[in-house]
Amino acid sequence: MLLITNSSHFKSQIKKRSMVFQYLLALVSGILVKAVDFIEDSKPKTLDSRLVLLSWPLAIAYGVTIGYLISQTPFSMILLAALFAQLVIGKIDNTAHGLGFTLAIVSTAYFGVPQFELFPFSIFMIFAILDETEFFKGTLDFMHHNRLFLPLSALIFAVAGKPDYLLGIVPFDVGYVLSDKGMGKFKQSPRQK
């Protein structure tokens, strides 16, 4: 009896650690995606030339990481929808993001394709597209500018009893915002040009 109790406790601890690891990977993925965004949008005029060389390795890292997360996590549909929303609206607009996108798909196939859930995927795809849409005014513009539509859709699922999507997208978005704030330090001052 003691062995069975310890065994279930052990499995519970492993599951908790696995989830923490997945949330950390989501955070890292957000950082990497925004870093590639920043490098690709800034080069070559205003960016330290050493940083430009990191674009492809960072895209490779985020592609593999996102592919792993899509394959292995209970929040796979929100990541898959966000990934495909980027393709649909034309945000995969340079070689580095094309590489990251392709590797995310290939990595998903390698690590294992998750069971496709049409309803959450469709909802998340719509809200991810809204995050990237430029035509809003007022409160909706604030939500678009701060990329709040997708987390809002995940919050709706959380209230309905499925918190995994929210728990997965929040660390990704936190990483994205942190990277956005931190990458500005790499821009060249006028004296460095």
Image (cartoon, rainbow, N blue to C red):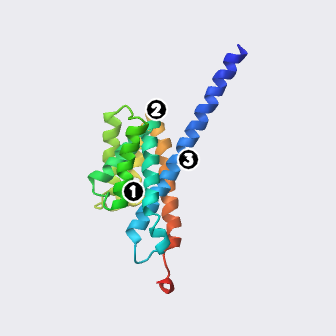
Q: Secondary structure at mark 1?
A: helix
The image position of residue 7, as x and y in percent, is: 66, 22
**Amino acid type of the residue that numbered disc 1 sits on in the rendered structure:** Met
Q: Which residue is mark 2?
A: 161
Pick out the residue farthest to the top. Answer: 1
Q: Secondary structure at mark 2?
A: loop
Q: Is residue 157 above or below residue 95?
A: above
Task: Mark 2: give few (<14), some (14-19) or many (20+) Cα within 10 Å.
Answer: few
Q: Which is more toward the observer, 35 or 162?
A: 35
Task: Mark 1: give few (<14), some (14-19) or many (20+) Cα within 10 Å.
Answer: some
User: Can you tell which quarter of the image residue 44 is in?
Assistant: bottom left
Q: Are marks 1 and 3 in contact (CB under 8 Å)?
A: no
Q: Which residue is mark 3?
A: 24
Q: Are marks 1 and 2 in contact (CB under 8 Å)?
A: no
The image position of residue 27, as x and y in percent, is: 52, 50
The image position of residue 143, as x and y in percent, is: 39, 56
Q: Earlier in the sequence, mark 1 or mark 2?
A: 1
Task: Mark 3: give few (<14), some (14-19) or many (20+) Cα within 10 Å.
Answer: some
**Amino acid type of the residue that numbered disc 2 sits on in the rendered structure:** Gly
Q: Which is more toward the observer, 129 or 38?
A: 38
The reply to whether residue 102 is visible in this rendering is yes
Q: Nearer the viewer, mark 1 or mark 3?
A: 3
Q: Which residue is mark 1?
A: 143
State how far apart marks 1 and 3 are (Cα).
25 Å
**Amino acid type of the residue that numbered disc 3 sits on in the rendered structure:** Leu
Q: Earlier in the sequence, mark 3 or mark 2?
A: 3
